Every structure is written in structure tokens, then in C-alpha cells.
Image (spheres, grey):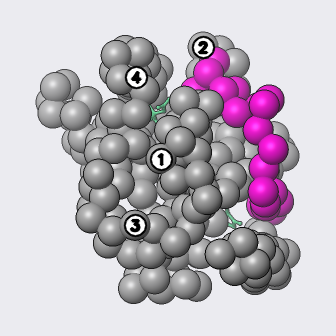
């Protein structure tokens, strides 16, 4: 398990090219590395997958075509791991966490959220990053059968009451305002609960 007990966990999800990494990087910069860390469930998955398949881990972490080339096979490989142990990638991802606020940038399945809700019920908040298909296409997204209609992309489309929805359209000019008000609102609500 993690070496520290978190005060707040922001569980991010969103469609491909909605801007999960972009938005979580902005929040990380805004809060600072002493206060928060970004945890990626796909990090340990990609690392293990890269090792087993002799691939470039850094490229799999990137936002380019290299990752997309292996996405379908990584999804299948990851789902086989999750079938055996749904919390495996969650446990590995939080091991390095030292800061009080955790930003999990890439939850994709109800089993991901259920693990955090079970282990950290009072600290976990669900955040959805949304962008139109037009905006996502401008960022390089193309609908791919077997990926964009599968659990990896659709697993959280129903059954989640999101605590915060971030609209990340176009150049995101309204983004900074949303982040300021959204973070304040979550902090205030958490403080009232503690
Ligand atoms: N508001 C924005 N303004 C400018 N560029 C953006 C914005 N949001 C996202 N981008 C760019 O769009 C691309 C996709 O964003 P990002 O990688 O954060 O998406 P993602 O949801 O993490 O995608 P994936 O699920 O494929 O990892 C990146 O090149 C990123 O820099
Ligand atoms: C294989 C997978 O972890 C790839 C995620 O890559 P990214 O978060 O889109 O950079 C998606 C999944 O776990 O279904």
C-alpha cells in the first residue's frame, strides 16, 4: 500500500484526447509537487507490457501514434491482469505516492473506482474531463472500432455520479477558471466533511 494516507484523491476519467493528461498536469502545476502527485494506472501496465514485448516504455507513455499502435493489445493484456486481480494496477500505482493529494489521471473501469471507494471512501472524488468529438478529432482522435466502443473507453459512461465535470473544449480558455472554482469547491466540501 502507499507510504502515506492521502487527504484527497481525484479520480479522473475521460474519452481519448479529452485532455486528461493536459488537465491533470495543469492541476499538478497549480497545486505544486509538494502537495500533489499524478498517479497513472496505465503506468505500471505499460511498463510491464513494454518489458514483456520489448517496446519503448516512454513512447507508450506519450501522446503519439506509437501508443495507439499497441492500444488494442495493451487493453486486452491489461484486462487479463484485471480479471485475476482488479486492484493490481491501483495498488502498484499508489506505491510511490508521498503527497497528501493524489491525482489518478486515467481511471477507465468501475473496478478502478470501486477499489478506491473501498480503500479510501472519504478521500475519493470522481472527476470527468469532457470534450466534443470535433475537439478530440482536432487533437488527433479517430473513432476506432474495438477501442472506442469497448470498456476501456466506455466503462464509466454510466453508473458514476461525478463530483466534478470539466469541459475541456478548443484551446481551453475557460479551463483555468473551471480549475480554480472546481478545486476550491472540492476543498471546501472536503473541509466541511473532515
Ligand atoms: N485545453 C487544451 N489546449 C490545448 N491543447 C490541449 C488541450 N487539451 C488537450 N490538449 C492536447 O490534446 C492532446 C490530447 O490531450 P491528452 O493527452 O491530455 O488527452 P488524454 O485524454 O490524456 O488522451 P489519452 O486517453 O489518449 O491519453 C495533447 O496533445 C494535448 O496537449
Ligand atoms: C491499455 C490502457 O491502459 C492504455 C491507456 O493509455 P492512455 O491513458 O490513453 O495514455 C487503457 C486500458 O487500460 O484500457
Q: What element carries label 1?
A: helix
| Mark 1 or mark 4: whose residue is earlier in sequence | 4
**Disc 4 packing (10 Å; few <14; some 14–19; many ≥20):** some
**Do callouts 1 and 4 mark residues in contact (Cβ within 8 Å)?**
no
Q: What element carries label 4?
A: helix
Which residue in the structure is indicated by mark 3?
Answer: 5
User: Can residue 183 be seen at all in this image of the molecule?
Assistant: no
- Cα–Cα gap, marks 1 and 2: 31 Å
Which residue in the structure is indicated by mark 1?
Answer: 119
Which residue in the structure is indicated by mark 2?
Answer: 146
Label ID, residue 82? 4
Ligand 2 within 8 A of label 4's CB? no
- Cα–Cα gap, marks 1 and 3: 11 Å
The residue under the point 42% across, 51% down is 40
Q: What element carries label 3?
A: loop
Left or right: 167 with respect to 113?
Answer: right
- Cα–Cα gap, marks 4 and 3: 24 Å
Of badges 4 and 3, nearer the viewer stands: 3
Highlighted range, magenta:
150-170
The residue under the point 58% across, 85% down is 30
Left or right: 91 with respect to 25?
Answer: left
The residue under the point 69% across, 80% down is 191
Of badges 4 and 2, nearer the viewer stands: 4
Image spot of residue 36 (x, y percent): 46, 76
Quadrant of the image occupied by residue 140: top right
- Cα–Cα gap, marks 2 and 3: 38 Å
- Cα–Cα gap, marks 4 and 2: 18 Å
| Quarter the C terminus occupies | bottom right
Image spot of residue 165 (x, y percent): 81, 57
Amino acid at each position: 500500500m502507499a507510504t502515506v494516507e492521502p487527504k484527497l484523491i481525484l479520480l479522473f476519467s475521460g474519452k481519448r484526447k479529452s485532455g486528461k493528461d493536459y488537465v491533470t498536469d495543469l492541476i499538478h502545476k497549480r497545486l505544486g509537487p509538494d502537495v500533489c502527485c499524478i498517479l497513472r494506472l496505465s503506468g505500471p501496465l505499460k511498463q510491464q507490457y513494454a518489458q514483456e514485448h520489448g517496446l519503448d516504455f516512454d513512447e507508450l507513455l506519450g501522446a503519439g501514434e506509437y501508443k495507439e499502435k499497441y492500444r488494442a493489445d495493451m487493453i486486452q493484456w491489461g484486462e487479463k491482469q484485471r480479471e485475476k486481480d482488479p486492484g493490481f494496477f491501483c495498488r502498484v500505482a499508489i506505491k510511490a505516492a508521498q503527497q497528501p493529494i493524489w491525482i489518478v489521471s486515467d481511471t477507465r473501469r468501475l473496478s478502478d473506482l470501486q477499489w478506491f471507494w473501498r480503500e479510501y471512501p472519504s478521500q475519493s472524488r470522481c472527476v470527468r474531463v469532457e470534450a466534443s468529438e470535433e475537439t478530440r478529432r482536432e487533437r488527433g482522435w479517430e473513432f476506432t472500432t474495438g477501442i472506442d466502443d469497448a470498456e476501456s473507453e466506455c466503462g464509466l459512461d454510466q453508473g458514476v455520479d461525478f463530483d466534478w465535470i470539466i469541459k475541456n473544449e478548443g484551446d481551453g480558455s475557460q479551463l483555468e477558471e473551471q480549475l480554480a472554482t472546481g478545486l476550491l469547491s472540492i476543498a471546501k466540501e472536503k473541509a466541511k466533511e473532515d
